Amino acid sequence: MKAPALTSADERITPAWRGVLVCSLLIFVGINLRSVILGVPPVLPLIKGALGLSYTETGLLTALPTLMMGGFAWFSGLLVERIGGRVAVAIGLALLAFGALMRAVWPVGFALYLFTIILSLGIALGQTTVPVLIRRWFPTRIGLASALFTDGLILGETIGAGFTVPAMLLFLGKTAWAATFIFWGLLVIVALACWLWLAPPAPPTRGAFAPVTTAEQMAVLDASKVQPAQAKPVSFVIPGLLLGSGSLMYFAMNSWIATYNQAIHAAGYTSLALTTLNALQLPASLGVTFFAQRLVGRRWPFIAGGVVSLVAVTGWVVTPPGVEFIWAALLGASSALVFALGLALPALLAAPTQVARLTGMTLTLSYSMAFIGPFIGGGLWDLFGLPPLAFLPVALAATLLIGLGTFLPLRSVGTARHL
């Protein structure tokens, strides 16, 4: 027996046209939650040279978003329960736009780190909130809506990584790295306006221990007596480790490709490698969009993603730079597979009242792991003077994916099938 969803009828997106509109809005929001931060790695060598940053400081700049998204995700989950999902996403987009534009207004070392922290808080709030809204708006299409949001995130990564340098060279100037922040920040303002105009109104999500006052909420508690597993809190550890491994691989590769190629005198291959890494995520994500609920909880996608990534990062450092795009394609596709399935887990596995907190805790663990990649990679490079060591955390994350998929079964596969 399937437990009724903890949503009122007016919160569900039922007309087909309205569902398409809201899904399109979620995709657009996802694009802007990634384009701002993925527009930085392509111009990172310019930033490093202009500000005189060390490799460790450069790695910290690219790792800050993942650190702040991880550190703030749990608090974001609690905040959503108080202020409501629609307001939370609006605040997140406002912080993102402010931080992005201010980085261009004050392009010096301290300010660059400060406003990166601010915009990262906005990303954390928005990204943690959307799965909660998906659970409320699309209770019978969680996998599909989550995958579409993931498609938006990946499309934003692709656009940010692939179009920043061409746009800079064509419209802004060869060294106008600060002006690229304005370009992406203005798009976030457009996304905020669209959200305020089109997002369905939604009351604050009730906490897990909030008073139950409606008949439908009472029905959920009655159903939980029949299915006690759904009433118990779902562990965030396995979803967080799986999602974190994929995120670490992706962010570390984006952070170091340009600087690594510059160090080995292969800068001419950087644009193709970065574009391929990000562009190949989208076909992989689309490939699982309509099968997310069937694939979630299975071992083989994560094992396959880990094996492919381990082979690819090894090939990256032992083969000529001319074939980097091949390894970038494999890394992009495998990390997208892991991310698309992992991001859907909280909304698929948790009871309605637990989604916000489980999402927050999962993302906290995930982005805490992703922060380690670029930062530790830069530290190893500084310590030993060997550029390939920047990719060692990627290899370790791929190995962890294989281990998790092989030895740590997901206990809630059956629960996912009931949703």
Image: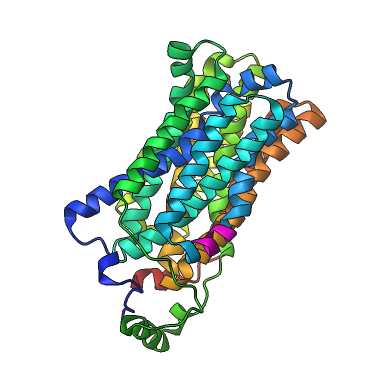
Q: Give yes or no for residue 105 being in the magenta stretch.
A: no
Q: Is residue 319 left or right of residue 230?
A: right
Q: If the image is split into quadrants, where does the C terminus sit?
A: bottom left
Quarter of the image where one finds residue 261: top right
The percent position of residue 117, horizontal first and vertical second, equals 62, 41
Identify whether 335 is placed above or below 164.
below
Q: Is residue 186 left or right of residue 148?
A: right
The structure residue drawn at horizontal position 43% and vertical position 36%, both measured from the top left corner, is 188
Q: Is residue 374 left or right of residue 380?
A: left
The percent position of residue 189, horizontal first and vertical second, equals 41, 36
Quarter of the image where one finds residue 11: bottom left
The percent position of residue 257, horizontal first and vertical second, equals 59, 27
Identify whether 381 is placed above or below 344.
above
> What span is in magenta?
74-80
Q: Compare residues 350 and 317 and report the one nearer the observer.
A: 350
The percent position of residue 153, horizontal first and vertical second, equals 43, 42
Q: Compare residues 178 and 155 and report the one nearer the observer.
A: 178
Q: Compare residues 11 and 232 and report the one nearer the observer.
A: 11
